[in-house]
Image (tube, rainbow, N blue to C red):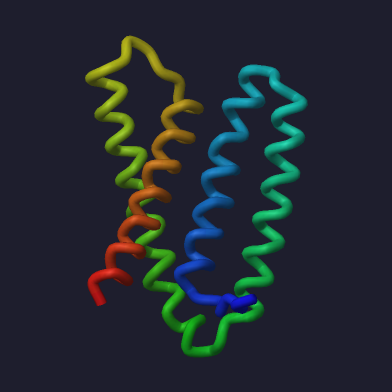
Amino acid sequence: MQQSIPTPERFSILAGLSVVIVATVPRYIAAGHDTQLSLILMALAVVATMTLFQWRLLSREARGRLPGLLKRLVVLLIVGVGVMTAWHAVVSDWFSWQLLLSHGTTLGLLLHALGLWWAAESS
C-alpha cells in the first residue's frame, strides 16, 4: 500500500471543502431540513479534523507555501460566487442568497482544484 504524503495543495482543498460545507448550512436551515443539517455538520466535523491532521503533518517549507494557496482559494471562491451571480441573473427567475452562496463556493472550490491539477500536469 502506497502512503500519501501531505501537501499544502491537499490542505487548501480540504480547507475549501470546509468552507463549502459551511456555505451550504444556511440552505438546510432555511428549508428546515434538520436531519440533513445534522449529517452536514457531522461531515464538517470530520473534514475539519482531517484538515487539522493534514496541517500538523506538513513540513515547515510546505507550510510556507500555504498563504499563497489560501489566497488563491479565497479569490477563486469569490470568483465562483460572482460567476454564479451572473449565471443566475441571466438564467433563472428567482434565486436565494443561500443557493447562490452554496453554488458559488462549490464552483470556486472546483476551479481551485482544477487549477491545482492543471498546474501539476503541466509541470
Task: Say left or right for 84 vs 19.
Answer: left
Residue 59, by quadrant, is: bottom right
Name of the residue lying farthest toward the front: 1
Image position of 64 with respect to 98: above or below: below
Q: Nearer the viewer, residue 114 or 96?
A: 114
Residue 122, percent from left and from top = 23, 71
Above or below: residue 45 compared with residue 81: below
Residue at horizontal 66 percent and vertical 25 percent from the top: 29
Provide residue 120's location: percent of width, then percent of height. Answer: 32, 71
The vertical placement of 52 against 64, above or below, is above
Tell me: 69 left or right of 90: right
**Residue 116 coordinates in the image, percent (x, y):** 35, 64
* Res 25 → quadrant: top right
Quadrant of the frame with the N terminus: bottom right
Please tell me which residue lies in front, 6 or 61: 6
User: Residue at the location (30% across, 46% down)?
Assistant: 79
* Quarter of the image with the C terminus in it: bottom left
- Residue in view at x 32 percent, y 10 percent: 93
Q: How many marks?
A: 0
The front one of 29 and 56 is 56
On screen, residue 82 above or below 63: above
Where residue 54 appears, as percent x and y from the top left, is 62, 72
Q: Which residue is drawn at 54% across and 39% down?
A: 23
| Outermost residue, top side | 93
